[in-house]
């Protein structure tokens, strides 16, 4: 059981960087496309969908960790600056996933190309900001199967 927890925590930690990189990619690509005034094509949806997918994976991994620790009666985020941080982390993670989903959906459903870029930039930016607030920055930035 200890290996499963360590493996999940390591994957969750490494995927954090994928989330941050794809979020920055989605935001920058959307802002560039909007300022360039070019048509919104399949290549413009790619960073938004990659961000959404990586964030959804992060939430699933986090929920698995949360459930695993709960079953073991282990306190989640022991040593956190606030006792409420576990709930903040969980809630903000879910909110970020909703924002990333809205970025994908609204950029697909908008009727004009500028509106598509605008929706992608707005919702990706909100999702990225939410992720940045939710990250426990006091913990090690990289974990490789070490707790």
Image (tube, rainbow, N blue to C red):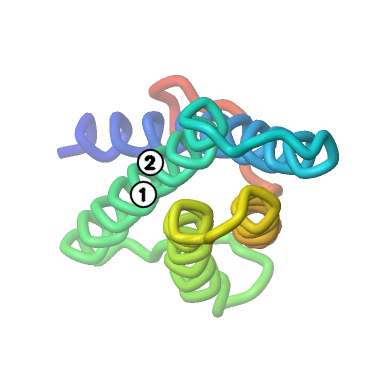
Res. 44 image quadrant: top right
Q: Nearer the viewer, residue 74 or 86?
A: 86
Of all residues, the one furthest to the bottom in this rendering is 84
The residue to which callout 1 is attached is 56
Q: The N terminus lies in which quarter of the figure?
A: top left
Of all residues, the one furthest to the right in this rendering is 35
Element type where label 1 sits in the image: helix
The numbered dot on residue 74 is: none
15 relative position to 40: left or right: left
Q: Say above or below: 147 vs 137.
A: above
* Residue 142 coordinates in the image, percent (x, y): 58, 27
Residues tagged 2 and 1 counted as in contact (Cβ below 8 A): yes
Element type where label 2 sits in the image: helix
Q: CA distance from mark 2 to mark 1?
A: 5 Å
Residue drawn at (16%, 63%) of the image? 71
Q: Nearer the viewer, residue 93 or 119?
A: 119
* Residue 54 coordinates in the image, percent (x, y): 42, 38
* Residue 128 coordinates in the image, percent (x, y): 65, 52
Q: Nearer the viewer, residue 8 or 112?
A: 112
* Residue 19 coordinates in the image, percent (x, y): 53, 38
Q: Say above or below: 90 vs 27.
A: below
Q: Nearer the viewer, residue 41 or 45?
A: 41
Q: The C terminus lies in which quarter of the figure?
A: top left
The residue to which callout 2 is attached is 53
Q: How many discs mark residues in the rendered view?
A: 2
Residue drawn at (82%, 34%) of the image? 36
Residue 135, visible in the rendered structure: no
Label 1 CA crowd tier, 10 Å (few <14, some 14–19, many 20+): many
Res. 33 image quadrant: top right
Residue 108, visible in the rendered structure: yes
């Amino acid at each position: 059981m200890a290996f499963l927890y360590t493996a999940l925590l390591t994957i969750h930690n490494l995927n954090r960087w994928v989330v941050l990189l794809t979020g920055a990619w989605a935001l920058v690509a959307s802002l560039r496309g909007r300022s360039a005034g070019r048509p919104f094509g399949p290549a413009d949806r790619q960073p938004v969908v990659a961000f959404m997918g990586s964030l959804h994976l992060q939430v699933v991994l986090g929920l698995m960790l949360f459930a695993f620790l709960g079953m073991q009666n282990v306190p989640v985020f022991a040593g956190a600056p606030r006792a409420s941080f576990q709930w903040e982390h969980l809630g903000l993670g879910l909110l970020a996933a909703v924002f990333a989903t809205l970025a994908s959906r609204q950029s697909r459903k908008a009727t004009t190309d500028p509106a598509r870029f605008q929706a992608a930039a707005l919702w990706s930016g909100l999702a990225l900001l939410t992720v940045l607030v939710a990250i426990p920055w006091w913990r090690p930035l990289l974990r490789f199967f070490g707790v």
